[in-house]
Image (cartoon, coloured by chain):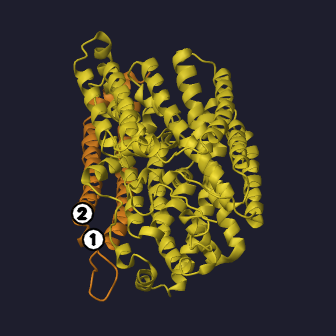
Amino acid sequence: MHEEAYRQIERNPRFQELVSKRGKFAWTLALLMLGLYIAFILLIAFVPHWLGTPITASTVITWGIPLGIGLIVAAIALTGIYVRRANGEFDRLTKAILDEVKL
Amino acid sequence: MKLRIPTLLALAGVTPCIYAADAITGEVEQQAINIPAIVMFVLFVGATLYITYWASKRTSSTSDYYSAGGKITGFQNGLAIAGDFMSAASFLGISALVFTSGYDGLIYSIGFLVGWPIILFLMAERLRNLGRYTFADVASYRLGKRQVRTLSACGSLTVVALYLIAQMVGAGKLIQLLFGLNYYVAVVLVGILMVLYVLFGGMLATTWVQMTKAVLLLFGASFMACMVLWHVGFNVETLFSDAVSVHAKGLAIMSPGGLVTDPISAISLGLALMFGTAGLPHILMRFFTVGDAKEARKSVFVATGFIGYFYILTFIIGFGAILLVSTNPAFYDASGALVGGANMVAIHLANAVGGSIFLGFISAVAFATILAVVAGLTLAGASAVSHDLYAGVIKKDNANERDELRVSKITTLVLGIVAIGLGILFERQNIAFMVGLAFSIAASCNFPILFLSMYWKKLTTRGAMVGGWLGLLTAIALMILGPTVWVQVLGHDSPVFPYEYPALFSMLVAFIGIWFFSITDNSVAAKHERGLFLSQFVRSQTGLGASGSVSH
């Protein structure tokens, strides 16, 4: 139904720009999240004692607590960063591409 | 009165079966009847039935029924997704895990959360742009529709059935603990209510019931965490140091314990949680309830925020329970065991910080949680049958809308009866592995096909079918041969397959199978399927031609 439009869009350099920019951004964030999580799992598997070391001598709070909470915060922050750019810059670019097709 | 409910948590850390966090398992003893809890639960049911009545007047077409007409906002959808994750078992189970092992509870909840950013970055907008009602719409976009829909529907129904068993049995156990009512009352009640919600209110009612519950649970958990922090003068250091001084394990609760032992198991579990989430049919269908990719992205951000917040709350609640529950003899019976078992710590803490009325409120919300989750499962199962099998496979996409809707409603009724039957059948069975198996199957069958259909041009129907079935069967086989079923359920001495979580291996099998049988496929059909990738790709990137979007 939209075959001709799809072909037209595919040839549009702006579309290529959108695909490469968004792809790079999404994969970077995804690999960052995966990397953080895998690093955390490896810390638990290999150096659990380090995670259980108090941050300072005068506290019972261990390194594991800020790291764990930090990972939760990082997950929320990374989704926020992606949504901000995708719903702004990328959506504007998409709209421009679709508007060109209409003409 | 000796009550032990070793949920998943295998509380002492002996062969911890992490997966089962979503299952309330083990023997329970019926408690005294809890009137405030029952009254508040009845109020909740009244409100949800009113929502269903309201929704039924707005639900007439198949689009309304499966996807609420695409009119749910990103924020509402995010709240509903969060609701799907904040199950009774994760609220009670994770706070119990923190109560008994401290830090391990945090590790466990992080595994559940990290899948969400990945879903957002790699899948959410493409799903929304390509699909209509079920994830099979996306997977079968350019492939052999009948084969792919059949496999996807089998994958979905297996996942739904396993999940339903865990929820129904959990409901039966919870009603004994929380309300002091009979097991069968819960199973029949949950079965009837879920059918009513879905049958009359479709996706609109299912979403609003889930949102209502999510708000109540977030409110209750926030209140409890605040009261705990108030008790320690809003000083986190005091919370932790006081907990360390009263806990039997002392400083050990501040560091990783026996939850994760070897890296292979840990990574396999991580993969199952992360990619299983991206293959759960009742989660994926939520992406079709919003209007466009923009709202789909927003909903993941909202969901991740609420889920993350909720897990931080359960961590505080668990530590609060160490301070306020473990030190109070009123919560222990004569033999020194916690009344109702470790799963009850959050409930006891509610009593300690808010008195009997708040206790009733939290009990009612914990039980209501199951209702909201099973309604979503039922709808996912019903759409797999009516949209994928009936309309897609039997009628070859030529089904008339009224017939399709009728098939969906009949399936809902059947699923209700089946769920009640399974709940009764599995009452005394060890169901701890069910949710784990569901996640593994979702990660090894649904997810690889869905992901590659969107990302890999060379994927063909043959590759998807062979790899998908291989993944499905490997996940089931390794789960049966592994420690959870082979040793704990079947009673053998040692497992044939040493790891508890098959996902690492079964996902590998699925991906290799799909890859090999796709690249060696030189048929005419395969060439045609690869040729269709271009238009699929442009549509997935721009949303042009997507259902529910403004036509250009």
> What is the chain letter for disc 2?
A
Can residue A103 be spotted in the picture?
A: no
Q: Secondary structure at mark 1?
A: helix
**Residue under numbered circle 2:** A43
Quarter location, residue B241: bottom left
* Residue kind at label 2, given as amino acid type: Leu
Q: Which residue is at 57% across, 34% downward?
A: B381
Instruction: Chain A: give its colour.
Output: orange
In-image side of B394 versus B532 (left or right): right
Can residue B321 be spotted in the picture?
A: yes
Query: Vertical placement of A11 versus B336: above or below?
Result: above
Q: Position of residue B105 (x, y in %)?
A: 42, 64
Q: Position of residue B473 (x, y in %)?
A: 38, 29
Question: Given contact means CB atoms under 8 Å apart, are the residues at marks 1 and 2 in contact?
Answer: yes
> What is the chain letter for disc 1?
A
**Residue under numbered circle 1:** A51
Q: Secondary structure at mark 2?
A: helix
Query: Vertical placement of A13 versus B32: above or below?
Result: above
Quarter location, residue B458: top left
Viewport quadrant of the N terminus of chain B: bottom right
Query: Callout 2: few (<14), some (14-19), or many (20+) C-alpha neighbours within 10 Å?
Result: some
- Rendered yellow, the chain in question is B
The mark found on residue B483 in the picture is none
Query: Callout 1: few (<14), some (14-19), or many (20+) C-alpha neighbours within 10 Å?
Result: many
Depth check: B338 or B33 in front? B338
Q: Earlier in the sequence, mark 1 or mark 2?
A: 2
